[in-house]
Image: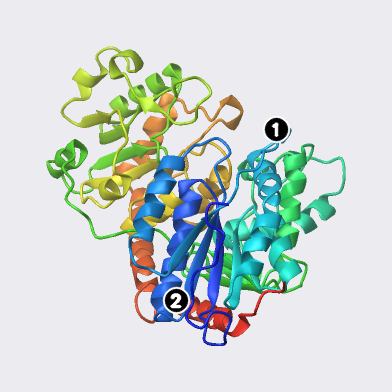
Amino acid sequence: MGSSTPPSQSGSGTPAAKPTVVLVALWGVSHFAPMVEVGKRLLALSGRSLTVNVLVVPSPTGKWEAEIFERIRRDEASGLNIRFHHLRAAEPPTDHTGIEEFVSRYVQLYVPQVKAIVSGLTCPVAAVVVDIFCTTLLDAPQELGVPAYVFLISSAAMAAVLLRSPSLDEEVGPGVEFEELEGGLDVPGLPPVPASCLPTGLDNRKISTYEWFLYNGRRYMETNGIMVNAIAELEPSVLAAITGGRCTRGVRPPTVYTIGPVVAIAPRIKLVNECLRWLDSQPTASVLFLCFGGGGGYFSTHQVHEIARGLERSGHRFLWVLRGQPEPPGSKLPTDANLAELLPAGFLEKTKERGLVWPTRAPQKEILAHAAVGGFVTHCGWSSIVESLWFGVPTLPWPHAAEQHFNAFTLVADMGVAEEMKVDKKRNNFVEAAELERAVKALMDDGETARKIRNKSMDMKAACRKAVEHGGSSVVCLERLYDALIQGAVDPKE
């Protein structure tokens, strides 16, 4: 164990010791960063009456490891009351059918280490907080008699579908696939959900990952609270359905805390970056920004050509982050793109007056903050969605995996901040050039649909910012959470 001894406390083991919150953080940046940000916000609220211990689950592949370690280095040097513990690596499972099953089974191997660290702390423990698919780790705080919470880096709608999944499974009965049902699935607070929009793994009742979705949904009910990376104003119908017990057969779930947007969005910094310099010369709200995740995303040559044709025919300005295939084969992160090899002949010349294709990582938050950006083609990872809402940028969803198809559905059907685009899930999420052209024009032209989406996006921008101001809904929720943590703090059992 990299750092298993408890932080030093004045009067260690005495009533004067400050209570601590233990966060169990996963290796992916999109999970790790929001989890640590929650800890920082609790520290800021506590007035130095609280500490945070972060237990870092090691990456099973090494992906993101360097970036995570750099973030830890900065936080350790910040002077905040945060201490990081690096858990000893365990051998990951190899026979899983999906990432949700993999995560659930992998983190279960760390229950003894988590239990040992928590029981060894010499201060009261206010809570152990686990990630969305890490409920196997709840065994540790339960055995110690310590309060436990789950943190969903995603939407309230995702909480609703997970809480609803066990009863939905029973209602549908054995031998029936969700796609066979007419009219969509009943998730209270949402319009009927098409089976094709369910999170990957929950859409296939024949695989073991499906059972892990149900398992996690059931175990949420054992926690002291559910934290959601959303704001109350964004999903009022869904939140009312959850808190009213409509997703859990009339049984009220643990308290839901909407504490979002949990994303580290600092004031815009003037970066020396060609993307931003190029945007400086473009008219306000005129540029469509295409970016598909932290790495930028990558596509087959055929799909790249379809995107290029769709953008060219749309007539709109664009900034397209285009990445190359991962190297060596089998690795996960994209490489810098060779534009001459990937793009159709003559495309750059034809669009040079209104487009920029960027072949490496781009500063997504700074680009979304730029006044020239008027639309965002996104893979619908929740962190990217939160950033688009924070900056009031309308979206064009192009989901690829995990819960992204479900997020895309909620953006269009529930929140009204996006234009729907037909994505062929059965063809590796392929989008035809003609469909991209249609969707871009619908989002970026000045028609009635586009105006409604822009207005709703700006409403959400205002709501997000108000939520994190003094007296705002998310601040009030965070204060309620802090009070519950302090009141519930206990000395862990030996």
Q: Quadrant of residue 160?
A: bottom right
Gap between marks 2 and 1 measured at Cα: 43 Å
Residue 40, compared with residue 420, is above or below; it is: below
| Residue pictured at 44% horizontal, 21% vertical | 327
**Dot label at residue 473:** 2
Q: Is residue 444 left or right of residue 15?
A: left
Q: Residue furthest right?
A: 174
Which residue type carries mark 1? Thr
Sort mark 2 into few (<14), some (14-19) or many (20+) by Cα contacts within 10 Å: many
Q: In this view, does 183 lie to the left or right of 267?
A: right
Q: Position of residue 288 (x, y in %)?
A: 29, 40
Q: Which of 445 and 69 is in front in this view?
A: 69
Q: Where is residue 486 in the image (x, y as percent from the top left)?
A: 55, 82
Sort mark 1 into few (<14), some (14-19) or many (20+) by Cα contacts within 10 Å: few
Which residue type carries mark 2? Ser
**Dot label at residue 94:** 1
Q: Position of residue 98 (x, y in %)?
A: 67, 38
**Label 2 or label 1, whichever comes before in sequence order:** 1
Q: Which of 462 and 159 is in front in this view?
A: 159
| Residue pictured at 12% horizontal, 41% vertical | 281
Q: Can residue 418 be seen in this view?
A: no
Label 2 residue SS: helix
Q: Which residue lies furthest to the left in this view?
A: 281
| Residue pictured at 42% horizontal, 70% vertical | 81
The quadrant of the image that shows the C terminus is: bottom right
Residue 487, compared with residue 219, is above or below; it is: below
Q: In which quarter of the image is residue 313?
A: top left
Foreground mark, 2 or 1, reads 1
Q: Is residue 203 left or right of residue 38?
A: right
